[in-house]
Amino acid sequence: MYFYELIKKLSENKKTKIYVDMDGVIASYDFGKPLDFANKRPLITNIKTLNELCKLQNVELFILSVCRFNNQINEKNNGLDKYAPFFDKNKRIIISKESNLHLSSKELKLNYLKTLKTEEQIIFIDDDNEVLKTIHNNIKNIILYQDSELID
């Protein structure tokens, strides 16, 4: 478990908050299919790795995900309850585009991450290269990983 060992070492002497995208990281994301979050295929390998990470002493796990409509927030929470219940309900940030008109997913995630004023180490995991590039170009004190890093 390379990624687990990497995070274990990074967080050994420092509190670490890990923010994880949901679509494409915890659940499958097929561009041509309806956004039925309640029935998406869970990505078991990634979920197992994240479950192990949440057991590390200095690590806190958060969801940072975006959906199109307000009612999909409940669908995403139900999917997490079913397949990844180790994500504390109070640590699930699911932002609806419906409530944030004219902002893209990358802008919504960037805006949220910019609000974090903490001495703790921040790690963000996403499957979207555009999101990762946007965050990299706008926030300097954040560690970014592509979702593929979760797989050994």
Image (cartoon, rainbow, N blue to C red):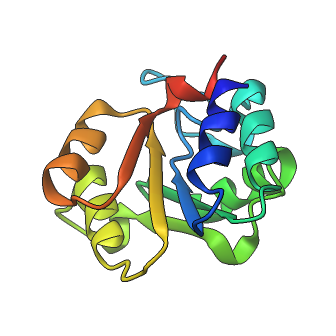
- The structure residue drawn at horizontal position 44% and vertical position 66%, both measured from the top left corner, is 95
Is residue 97 in view? yes
From the viewer's perspective, tell me whether residue 46 is left or right of residue 71: right
Quadrant for the C terminus in the image:
top right
Is residue 70 in view? no
> Residue 101 lies in what quarter of the image?
bottom left
- Image x and y of residue 121, in percent: 47, 65
Q: Nearer the viewer, residue 99 or 149?
A: 149
- Image x and y of residue 103, in percent: 20, 61
- The structure residue drawn at horizontal position 45% and vertical position 62%, both measured from the top left corner, is 122
From the viewer's perspective, tell me whether residue 106 is left or right of residue 84: left
Q: Nearer the viewer, residue 81 or 129?
A: 129
From the viewer's perspective, tell me whether residue 137 is left or right of residue 86: left
Q: How many numbered discs?
A: 0
> Residue 69 lies in what quarter of the image?
bottom left
Residue placed farthest to the front in the image?
A: 13
> Residue 119 lies in what quarter of the image?
bottom left
Is residue 125 depicted above or below 110 in this figure? above
Is residue 63 depicted above or below 36 in this figure? below
Q: Nearer the viewer, residue 128 or 51?
A: 51
Quadrant for the N terminus in the image:
top right
Residue placed farthest to the bottom in the image?
A: 117
- Image x and y of residue 15, in percent: 59, 69
Is residue 1 depicted above or below 53 in this figure? above
- Image x and y of residue 16, in percent: 57, 64
